[in-house]
Image: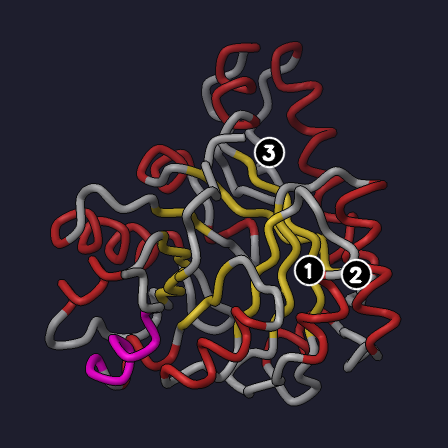
Amino acid sequence: MPIDWAGVDHVTKVDPAKAMPDRPEAIRATDLVLVGGSDDVTAANTLTAVDRLREVAPDLPVLQEPYDGSQVTRETVEAVDAVAVAAIFNGDREHFHGKHLDFFADLARAPREVTGAGVPLIGGLVEAKGHEAVDAITEKLVPEGYVIQNPDSAAARQTNAETPLDADGVAGAALATETFYDFPVFYVEYSGTYGGPADVAAAAEQLEETTLLYGGGIDDAAKAAEILDAGADAIVVGDVFHDDVDRFLQTIPDRR
């Protein structure tokens, strides 16, 4: 796995379609950055965001979390440390494994065949064919088990997600992520709405090795602490970074 999750308890999600805050150097307080979003994200603005992050925080791990294959090119993959690929348990077939099946089918034939076709998951990434190119791509992939819990979110609409899952559903998805799929990450996503600790606690009971992430509505120290106390390994903070840097800094856990 290309990312060491040990010691990561604060993750910042940067949306390439949104403006960076006036003090982008505040990102240095986080442990890891996810770059991605559901609306108006392109490969070009993803690269712009990653380049800016590298300028202000060159030592931070940066992952791209694409929603669509058009957001990913060879340039974006080379610019980031890893590419997080979500398998959405309560989404439609396309967003659970359809895109992934198409992607790996293209990778499997890439060393044997030169074509002009784009790869569904990651655009036209495999221009240079051959086993070395395939290995370089697959080594950067980080699969995530994923549940979307906010029915009013863009992510829920775009993936046709059945939301919200009850606590048993969240627990089952977490257990499948670790024991059946052996994914390194399980992500409970509330997409801008604070979901509280119940789903986190249900998932945490099922996980021993898999990293548990929670994202959604965390904009102060109290919410950050509540989610971490419920069993999350790390919180994911997004909107508040773009909207209010001072409140963003309040979400950083006390590590003294």
Provide residue 114's location: percent of width, then percent of height: 58, 17
Q: Residue at x 74, y 38 (%)?
A: 182
Depth check: give the residue in front, 163 or 72: 163
Q: Residue 185: which numbered mark, if any?
A: none
* Helix, strand or loop under label 2: loop
Among the two numbered marks 2 and 1 on one chain, the one whose residue lies closer to the N terminus = 2
Mark 2 and mark 1 residues within 8 Å of each other at the beta carbon = yes
Q: Magenta stretch: give its range.
A: 245-252
Q: Type of residue at label 3?
A: Ala
Task: Look at mark 2 in the image and give the residue it sits on.
Answer: 89
Which secondary structure, mark 3?
A: loop
Q: Quick one: label 2, few (<14), some, or many (20+) residues within 10 Å? A: many
Residue 131 located left or right of residue 159: left
**Residue 222 spot, x, y in % from top left:** 43, 85
Q: Identify the residue at image location x=32%, y=54%.
A: 44
CA gap between label 1 and label 3 equals 29 Å
Residue where numbered disc 3 is placed: 117
- Please state, as top left, top right, bottom left or bottom right, where the N terminus lies in the image: top right
Is residue 157 or residue 216 the one in the foreground?
216
Kind of residue sitting beneath label 1: Tyr
Q: Secondary structure at mark 1?
A: strand
- Earlier residue among tags 3 and 2: 2
Report the residue at 62% width, 19% height from top: 110
Q: Residues within 10 Å of mark 3 (few under 14, many from 20)?
A: few
The disc, 1 or 3, on the residue closer to the chain's N-terminal end is: 3
In the visual, does 190 lie left or right of 198? left
Question: According to the image, label 1 marks what residue?
Answer: 146
Residue 251 is one of the magenta-drawn residues = yes
Residue 188 position in % (x across, y down): 64, 68
Tag in front: 3 or 2: 2
Residue 93 painted magenta:
no
Q: Type of residue at label 2?
A: Phe
